[in-house]
Amino acid sequence: MKYLLILMLLNLLGVFHFSTQTSKRSKQNTEDWISLFNGKDLTGWDMKIADRPLNDNYLNTFQVEKGMIRIVYDAYENFDDKYGHLYYKKRYSHYKLRFDYRFVGEQTSGGEAWNIRNSGVMVHSQSAESNTFEQHFPVSIEVQLLGGLSNGKERNTANLCSPGTAVERFGEIDYRHCINSSSRTYDGDQWVSVEVVVMGDEYIAHLIENDTVLRYEHPQIGGAFINKNQKGKDWESMGVTNKEEWIAKEGQYLSEGYIALQAESHPIDFKNIELLNLCGCTDPKAVNYKSYFVKSETKSCVYK
């Protein structure tokens, strides 16, 4: 009887240990997505609109309504090149970003024809405050968002555009300003789900509805803002008055930066803007260790 009780006790201890270890592993594998938008106001975000001071929400372009960030032009008589961006205040290097977007209504008067149902989300971007006063777009990697047009032609979304930047594909630098993804066309005002996987200066991937539609490597300063053949003139045409600083950095890899939502003349809504940071403690002995971290931040480790 005594031995039976001992065996039962050992078995219970084993079950408890196994349950504890399983629970620990489950916690280590659980993804801790954070919301970049509180659903109520623009706390945590900076805005910069061309020809306007930092954080001047010109004509109430950036609005919050029913858990969405809305980019609207109700008060505009003419777009007048008031390209704008809403920047999250924290820099990131290795992460997954996911969000939903939809185009609504009609384009603002004065917007360029190519900006109908056209917007974007910038990653590895310069900060809001580092933009020059007249600057139209930040130096960044743009996940270009496009909606279908009434002509019925194919129009991919989650493309790549590269204001002031370039990327590598198939082992060579690709200086094209925009590179199409393999996504299908999304017509009307439907919500579209996007995920962007950003791995520092290694690679970036665009996903639509969990399907990878574009991937490229080594995002870097490109030496030109739009067209490398214009020898710097395109920087000036986009309001970049400190072009020499960027041209001198040509070829410098972009390993981190800011995330920004674009205002490009067509109304657009964003919701469910969430981020999974892939940087953190990679020591399994730490209480804040996560198995999915790909970049180690030793200083962040917390121990009992």
Image: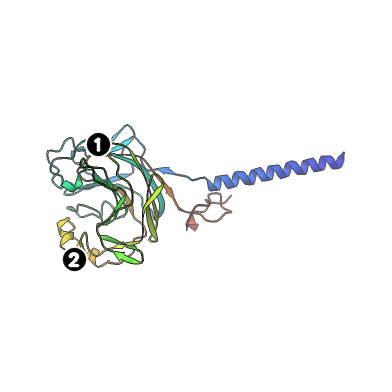
Q: Is residue 130 above or below residue 265?
A: below
Q: Which residue is mark 2?
A: 229
Q: Residue at x 59, y 46 (%)?
A: 24
Label annotation for residue 8: none
Front residue of 206 and 198: 206
Q: Quadrant of the N terminus?
A: top right
Residue at image mark 1: 104
Q: Is residue 225 above or below residue 71?
A: below
Disc 2 on helix, strand or loop?
helix
Q: Quadrant of residue 199?
A: bottom left
Whole-number angstrom distance, CA of label 2 to CA of label 1: 36 Å
Figure quadrant of residue 217: bottom left
Considering the numbered disc 1 on the image, is that residue within a helix, a strand or a loop? Answer: loop
Q: Position of residue 62 (x, y in %)?
A: 25, 39
What is the crowding at mark 1: few (fewer than 14 residues within 10 Å), some, or many (at least 20)? some
Towards the viewer: 52 or 209 = 209
Q: Earlier in the sequence, mark 2 or mark 1?
A: 1
Percent across and percent down for residue 283 are 55, 56
Residue 52 in view: no
